[in-house]
Image: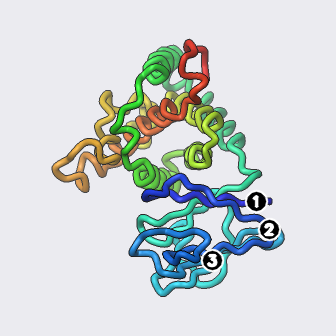
Amino acid sequence: MAYHLTIVFGADAGTVYAVEDGQRCSVGRSEDSNIRLDDEAVAWEHAVLVVEDNRLYCENLSALGTKVNGRPLTDRTRVVPGDRVELAPNAVLTVGSDQTSTSGGGSMITVLALIAVVVIGAGFAATLLWNVMLKEKFAPVTAAEQSADWGGTYFRLERKIAEWTEEKRVPPELGAAFESAWRYESLGEQATAHKAYGQLVKDMMILQDPVAKDKSFAAAASGTGRELGVYLGTIDSEDPATMPWAGDAAHASGLVWFVRTRHRLSTPKKDTSKAFGGI
């Protein structure tokens, strides 16, 4: 089985490296590194990843330290698809594989969504979905959207989802589906990513908002998406570290707009001229 290591930040964001069984992959600033990261916070020889018996392991080689999903490595550690290998704040690799699938998380969220629809109202959700999908399908891609800090915003929202999951305010399947959609897009699998984001757009019409308990994510979201703009760096804020930008409500709204926008931006080119007919 081959594993895929995707660079998240910097000029090389989106670059994917394949590591197969028996291979050793060094990571660092050295020109001899298999994965070279041009970041002063990364050591010359920072870490090494190796695949043995179809299992991927990571070992830290630097005094600066390496983390997997936020936990410092103390010895060689197995990593699996969906894990994040963090060498520095802006030097992060995500792990994928040939066998990664989005079907499990998406289907579970759909079941939860169908249960919650009784509370929110199927008619309202269907109308809102139709309007949102029509707007997203034909809205143009702006220069600001293309150059924005999507990687940093993704991890900001991912951490917030993990916090909500731990507090049992959202189902764990939400984080899994969000991570899967981003991973497929990072791997260049646009059609699969577009479908995954589209499923999330639908789910957020129904899933209960972590703050506004009587509303869905989509119903509680702002009408402007300004929160997402602040996170992306396309909108200036006097103090983005304070409310309302750092609060749960802002993150929930930002998540909705993130998913909507990535769904639109991940539309395969061959589908951009088609009339709306589902995703």
Identity, as a three-letter code, of the amino acid under mark 2: Asp
Residue 7, x across and y down, in percent: 53, 59
Q: Residue at x 80, y 68 (%)?
A: 21
Badge 3 element = strand
CB contact under 8 Å: marks 2 and 1: yes
State how many labels appear.
Answer: 3
In the foreground, 275 or 30: 30
Vertical arrangement, residue 221 with respect to residue 153, above or below? above
Q: Residue at x 83, y 71 (%)?
A: 53
Residue 167 in view, yes or no = no
Q: Which residue is mark 1?
A: 2
- Determine which of the numbered discs, if any, sits on residue 78 in the image: none
Residue 191, x across and y down, in percent: 64, 34
Q: Which residue is mark 3?
A: 48
Residue 67 in view, yes or no = yes
Between the residue at mark 1 and the residue at mark 3, the CA separation in whole angstroms equals 16 Å
Residue 65, x across and y down, in percent: 49, 81
Vertical arrangement, residue 74 with respect to residue 174, above or below? below
Q: Which residue is mark 2?
A: 21
- Please give left or right for residue 180 compared with residue 160 in the image: right
CB contact under 8 Å: marks 1 and 3: no
Q: Residue at x 44, y 57 (%)?
A: 11
- Please give left or right for residue 106 compared with residue 53 in the image: left
Identity, as a three-letter code, of the amino acid under mark 3: Val
Between the residue at mark 2 and the residue at mark 1, the CA separation in whole angstroms equals 7 Å
User: Mark 3 or mark 1, which is nearer the start of the sequence?
Assistant: 1
Identity, as a three-letter code, of the amino acid under mark 1: Ala
